[in-house]
Amino acid sequence: MEAKKLDVPTDALLDPLSSRWGKVPQETIGLEGTPVQLQPSRYVRAKWSDRPTGTVRSLGVRAVHNGRQVLFQLEWGDPTQDREYADRGFPDAAGILFPLNGAARLQTMGSPEAPVNAWYWRADSDLARNLVASGLGSVEGAGDGRLTARSAWAKGVWRVVLSRPIRRPQKTPAVRFLADRTVQVAFAIWDGGSGERGGIKSFSRTWRELRLER
């Protein structure tokens, strides 16, 4: 996967519906449900033991940078716009995951020796949070990651843009983008209307290589 270099202001690219995104190649990524048996909560394992996980099975991803910011546009089908907590429902959400040392196991959200960094958006706040994890059930906030998110839902389709400066925030666990090397990336989607939250989600089961176009 390549983040195309565009000479476009960041504000324009933050618009999920901007026509600029239509000129960027989109990669379609297959998603699968997370394995219930790996969930650390006994309650979650029991509740989902006879239910399928991973409602969303396909995700469209575009990646760009303008020399200052790295931005991803995520696009997926969802017949309902879930922005609030409701009866048996939760807000829709999306995440972009990066290993912090290049050796993290994706299925377990990293490990104490190989943690991961996540950019997390949730529809009820429409903000992006910088998170780290060192294994299932260990997700926690990681300070100011200088992340930005914008979202739009129309005609059964979510479009969400997540962005961060190329320069890594100081004193904050965060992925490092360098022009001369690739980083690994993975994606996750939560369908709140189906009751998905926490470790119950759709995710891309393998890391993908991402590089910034020079």
Image: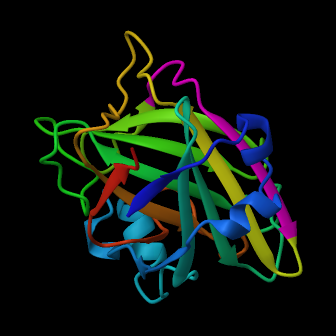
Quadrant of the image occupied by residue 126: top right
Q: Is residue 212 above or below residue 167?
A: below
Quadrant of the image occupied by residue 16: bottom right
Where residue 31 appears, as percent x and y from the top left, is 44, 79
Q: Is residue 11 above or below residue 76?
A: above
Near-viewer residue (195 or 14):
14
Question: Which quadrant, please, contains the N terminus?
Answer: bottom left
The span shown in magenta is 141-153
Let me know if residue 62 is in the magenta part.
no
Number of numbered discs present? 0
Question: Which quadrant, please, contains the C terminus?
Answer: top left
Residue 89 in view in this figure: no
Residue 101 is left or right of residue 80, and the answer is: left
Where residue 74 appears, as percent x and y from the top left, is 61, 63
* Residue drawn where x is 52% and y is 33% of the image: 67
The residue most toward the top is 171
Near-viewer residue (73 or 80):
73
Near-viewer residue (89 or 31):
31
Q: Is residue 7 above or below residue 166?
A: below
* Residue drawn where x is 73% and y is 36% of the image: 9
Residue 72 is left or right of residue 8, and the answer is: left
Where residue 92 appears, as percent x and y from the top left, is 69, 62
Quadrant of the image occupied by residue 37: bottom left
Where residue 208 appears, as percent x and y from the top left, is 30, 64
Near-viewer residue (125 or 212):
212
Residue 91 is left or right of residue 95, and the answer is: right
* Residue drawn where x is 40% and y is 82% of the image: 49
Residue 5 in view in this figure: yes
